[in-house]
Amino acid sequence: MAEAPARRKVTINTLNAKMKKGEPITQLAAYDYRTAVVADRLGIDILCVSDTGGMILFGHQSTVKVSFDEVMMMSQAIDRGSKHGLRMVDMPYWSFHVSPEQAVENAGRFVHEANAEVMKCEGNKYHAKNIEAIIRAGIPVQGHIGITPMRMPQIGGFVAQGKTAKRAKEMVEDAKAMVDAGCFSILCEVTTSEVAEYLAETLPVPVISLGAGNCAHGVHIISSDLFHLWEEHVPRHSRIYTDLIPIMEDVFTRYMNDVKTRNYPGEKETVFMNPEEAIAFATDMKWERKVDELKSAKKKTA
């Protein structure tokens, strides 16, 4: 059987080529080394360090609580675990919102300290100025519209966006403003399918769906949602491929039982001294019970 051709590095040009050919783009939110290794090996196009990782790994109840340093740590782990996928960082809350200078400084830190290649920025047309500054500094950005967790109070909570013609038009304007600012791609999070479909047909850049239907150029999914690792809530748009929770519960239960019954660790999981060294050690320590035990065992095997 012939070997599969070596995988090439994914670039923005790769994504544009896929868009033109009609080949769906895969974008995965990842935040740990092993997930990056496996996903990269299998051919995921974009590895996005999502601030959702702060909820899964550190127990934050909202992405707004995830710190810059926590996202940096996750970004560095993804860099160590990937070779081919495009490395994207979801810029955390208040890291690009204050000014163009702040936006460029923080995006630059992710490039310099975590080897990130592109950023993802949540927002609307009012954030376009700061996003444009990042792009002008030489760092590509994917614009993120629709449900933007950093703006939950403003958009009315975690509810699908674009159900009315007025709201749909607002998001189209947001997306166009981001493309005009230079964004290489647009992510639609939990918008109506019609919004994502319209943008995919009219924008010159790849449009990615996160819970926005199947008419975009690609799909983004949060890796932990594939395994039901956030038990507190299962989004409607998520698909659980394997529920790891009962598997984890079963493994932890069996482990605890084996410890309580002294079945773990067993001999095959344990390192012992050879009998002579063990007797010498026990004798030196005046560990009489052990000396008697070892000598008795030695007689039985003689």
Image (cartoon, rainbow, N blue to C red):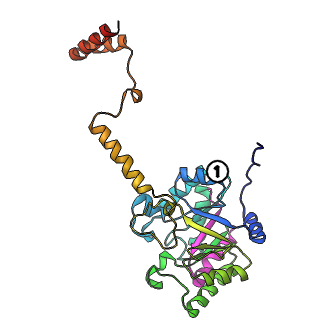
Q: Where the N terminus falls, by quadrant?
A: top right
Instruction: Please give the range of residues in magenta.
Output: 115-137
x, y (%) of residue 107?
59, 66
x, y (%) of residue 92?
51, 68
Residue at 44% in and 60% down: 229
Query: Three-letter amino acid code at disc 1?
Result: Arg
Residue placed most toward the observer, 232 or 93: 232
Taking the image as drawn, is residue 157 in sight?
yes
Q: Is residue 43 above or below residue 20?
A: above
Q: Residues within 10 Å of mark 1 (few under 14, many from 20)?
A: some
Residue at 44% in and 58% down: 57
Disc 1 secondary structure class: helix
x, y (%) of residue 297?
30, 13
Residue 169 appears left or right of 70: right
Residue placed most toward the observer, 222 or 155: 222
The residue beneath circle 1 is: 41
